[in-house]
Amino acid sequence: MPHLNILTRAEIESLGPPALDELEDTGVAQQFLCDLTLKHVAALPDPSTASVADRLKLPKALTEELLYHLYREKLIEMRLQSAVGATRYAMLDHGWERLSRLQSQNGYVGPAPVSLADYAHMMRLQAVPFRPASMESVRHAFRDLVLNQIPDMFPKLRFGFIEASASWIPYLIHKLRRDNTKRWKASWQSPADLFEDCRFFVACEADEDIPYLIKYTGEGHLLTGSDYGHNDPAEQAHLVTQMKAREDVAPSLVEKILCDNPKQFYGI
């Protein structure tokens, strides 16, 4: 398999906050974490350190610390204490009373939330590209997704090529099909079959040759954006008017590009 121009799992994880060693490292109030832990103990049929840790998405050592706090408060009892991480628990009457009050105040039952500081940190990282985007990188991404059949590995995932226009598609499809005949699926009788099978969506611009492009993408895989909402030199303030004024694009296709296809892509 050739090198993929995407981040590896290790690279992605290295970008995030460091692993938690102490409860204080979560940046979340300990009482909130204790209350959340109690909710999970109540919801699980056979709560153990491991199963509660899996629900909280916290290390077992920190989860056990939270559970021991609930034990000291006489909200839960230890049913079976064996290997580390395998201790089993059960709710006590005082715990059920506490749970009833909690549920009337806050119904959240899920993973331990991240702190605002950690969330902001990850948003800043995602806002800065790991590698500067270019037309070449877009073509490489498309090529790698197709030739390595990445969409087959994630059958529910849709892939979007946004803010890179769409006129590169015919050239790249021609080159991929010519140079990689052994890796071109037999079911891809036409380029549109590839877009349908791989769930690819591409954002086109209002003045591109859309009738020509849909021969490659099919009508269900082009969408567009105006950059409305932020200051951008590429902003198309009159996008809808321009699209509807085109005599070479059927109104039904305009509706698909402006409304139906974006809904399909974003799962709206």
Image (cartoon, rainbow, N blue to C red):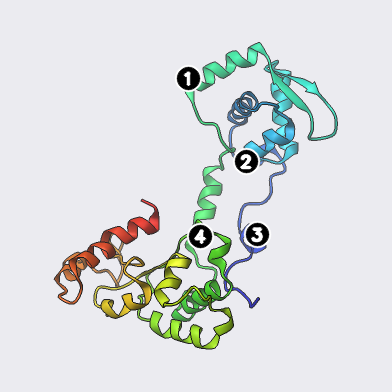
Q: Looking at the picture, which amino acid does disc 2 mark? A: Thr
Taking the spot 42% from the left edge, 77% from the top edge, the residue there is 191
Circle 1 is placed at which residue position?
Answer: 104
Circle 4 is placed at which residue position?
Answer: 126
Query: Separation of disc 4 and disc 3 at Cα?
Result: 13 Å
Circle 2 is placed at which residue position?
Answer: 26
Image quadrant assignment for residue 251: bottom left
Q: Position of residue 220 (x, y in %)?
A: 34, 65
Query: Separation of disc 3 and disc 1 at Cα?
Result: 39 Å
Q: Looking at the picture, which amino acid does disc 1 mark? A: Ser
In the drawing, does residue 195 fall left or right of residue 183?
left
Q: Earlier in the sequence, mark 3 or mark 1?
A: 3
Taking the spot 58% from the left edge, 29% from the top edge, the residue there is 32
Query: Separation of disc 4 and disc 2 at Cα?
Result: 20 Å
Circle 3 is placed at which residue position?
Answer: 14
Q: Position of residue 52 (x, y in %)?
A: 68, 33
